[in-house]
């Protein structure tokens, strides 16, 4: 299956547009499982469905100009980033509405109802994660895979091409670093 994903990604990179039709059936269930794991950790009352999150992330990935994924790990890293941005965008729109923002974003089917407190926490995490990425992109990518996609430590290490022990050390460092950044505000 890994070879099939990599083969299809190379075909997409080579300009074979029809290859995108082959990709979704192969990665859909895995993306949906990852979204389900992530949403399992969300606050009670969350109405976001894994299917909606997967579809929006996939549309963003396929619709982007940067579809030059090298392999399966690279693709799933991009999927993690797309899911993170969807959740952050939604949190920002909720915060804007709370502060009287007049613009109405286009709603996506099944997006979660995020409380203001949860939205502020998510935005603070996103800002701290961007700062961490500037310092150490591998640690930031590990957080994205663990927190936003729901991969376990072994899956994250494999996706990043690092050892499990390195992933565990990076995870401990990243959690402490992010906690310090978020709590300083």
Image: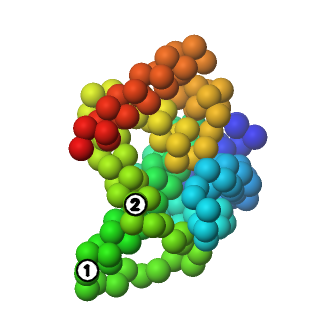
Place of residue 135 in the rendered image (x, y in percent of width and height, measured from the top left): 27, 28
Name the one closer to the observer, 97 or 158: 97
Q: Secondary structure at mark 1?
A: loop
Residue pictured at 32% horizontal, 75% vertical: 98
State the image coordinates of residue 52 (x, y, percent, origin top left). Answer: 61, 69
Crowd rating for badge 2 (residues with CA inside 10 Å; few <14, some 14–19, many 20+): few
> For the point 37% across and 34% down, which residue is it?
179
Mark closest to the chain's N terminus, 1 or 2: 1
Judge left or right: residue 51 versus residue 131. Answer: right
SS assignment at label 2? helix
For label 2, the residue is: 117
> Foreground mark, 1 or 2?
2
**Image quarter in which the N terminus is found:** top right
Residue 43, above or below 125 = below
Q: Position of residue 116 (x, y in %)?
A: 39, 66
Which picture quadrant has residue 101? bottom left
């Amino acid at each position: 299956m890994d070879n099939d994903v990599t083969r299809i990604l190379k075909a997409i990179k080579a300009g074979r547009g029809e290859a995108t039709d082959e990709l979704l059936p192969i990665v859909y269930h895995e993306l949906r499982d990852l979204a389900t794991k992530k949403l399992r950790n969300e606050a009670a009352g969350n109405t976001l469905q894994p299917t909606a999150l997967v579809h929006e992330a996939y549309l963003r990935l396929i619709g982007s100009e940067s579809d030059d994924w090298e392999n399966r790990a690279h693709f799933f890293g991009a999927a993690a980033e797309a899911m993170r941005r969807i959740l952050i965008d939604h949190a920002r729109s909720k915060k804007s509405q709370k502060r009287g923002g007049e613009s109405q974003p286009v709603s996506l089917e099944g997006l979660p109802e995020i409380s203001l407190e949860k939205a502020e926490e998510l935005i603070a995490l996103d800002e701290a994660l961007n700062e961490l990425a500037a310092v150490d992109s591998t640690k930031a990518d590990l957080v994205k895979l663990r927190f936003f996609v729901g991969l376990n430590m072994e899956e994250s290490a494999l996706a990043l091409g690092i050892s499990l022990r390195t992933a565990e050390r990076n995870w401990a460092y990243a959690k402490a670093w992010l906690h310090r950044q978020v709590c300083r505000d």
